[in-house]
Amino acid sequence: MAEIRPPIALAASILDADLGNLANAVRRVERAGADRVHLDVMDGHFVPNLTFGARTIRALRPRTRLPFDAHLMIANPGQYVAEFIAAGCDSITVHVEIDEPIEPTLRAIHRAGRRAGLALKPGTSLDMLAAYRGLFEIVLVMTVEPGFGGQSFMSDAAGKIAAVRELPGLPDQLEIQVDGGINDRTARTVGELGVDVLIVGSALFRPGRPMAPELNRIRAAGEAGRVG
Ligand code: DX5
Ligand code: ZN
């Protein structure tokens, strides 16, 4: 019997929103039909940029009913994970390339009843996931170098999307997210590769362009890719 998979989900990254009015940004993406809010946390060490932290996320939590996915591009998530849990994140994804032990952080996320994810930079091998089998249910495949919105999609890195599902010992309900350069063209490519969640930033926040039609086009392109 063919596997039944839920429809492709769209997570709106607010990195390229008006940072002076984030409450409006999360309401806008909800109204436009996004399924989740994707929150890019950067520390200026793991990536050469700074964004916001758990306090900002906590302040945004009551402003929308959408689930919150935190993408921690930080060198030491172990020190802060409790704060992101308390801020109301539904899932928390950390990078597999960091130097500190990752397992305690993944366990802390699970103890709090949230979903845990591992993110891979474009050049990082899927072999890095093996050590954490059983400790995560999300893999986030980056198709740009982390740090900034608005970069071009790296198709070589996207190849990992199809390869993840072939890895032994991963959960049946594994969710594969793609992050970086997703628009109404690249969504089709990653849909074909079997992605579950499209993370979309700058393509949604284009000045003067209504968000809902853009979001619908991207989602439709992803679904079209999935069915072939
Ligand atoms: C980049 C972030 C992304 C970014 C995506 O480091 O992780 O989530 O906001 O933005 P676009 O869609 O413009 O590549
Ligand atoms: Zn991200």
Image: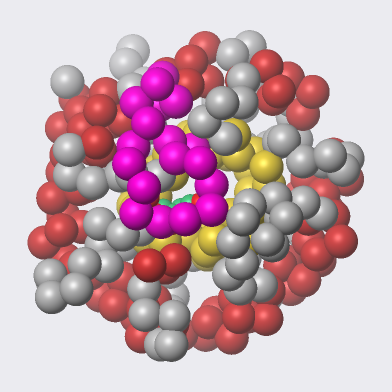
Q: Residue at x 34, y 37 (%)?
A: 153
26 left or right, relative to 68: left
Query: For the view shown, which residue lies furthest in the front direction?
Result: 48
Location of residue 58 (image quadrant): bottom right
Residue 122 in picture, x, y percent from top left = 52, 31
Does 201 sit above or below residue 185?
A: below
Q: Residue at x 31, y 59 (%)?
A: 202
Location of residue 130 (image quadrant): top right
Residue 55 in picture, x, y percent from top left = 67, 81
59 left or right, relative to 97: left
Query: Which sits in the foreground, 121 or 108?
Result: 121
Magenta span:
142-159
Query: Which of the image's four quarters has the C terminus?
Result: top left
Does 52 sit above or below residue 20?
A: above
Query: Which of the image's four quarters has the N terminus?
Result: top left
Residue 185 in picture, x, y percent from top left = 17, 38
Is residue 5 found inside the magenta-colored segment of the image? Answer: no
Q: Which SS type dominates the magenta stretch?
A: loop
Location of residue 196 (image quadrant): top left
Q: Residue at x 19, y 73 (%)?
A: 207
Q: Residue at x 53, y 82 (%)?
A: 60
Q: Is residue 161 visible?
A: no
Q: Is residue 178 visible?
A: yes
Q: How is the image coloured?
A: secondary structure
226 left or right, relative to 124: left
100 left or right, relative to 20: right
Does 113 sit above or below residue 66?
A: above
Query: Which sits in the foreground, 195 or 201?
Result: 201
Query: Which sits in the foreground, 124 or 115?
Result: 124
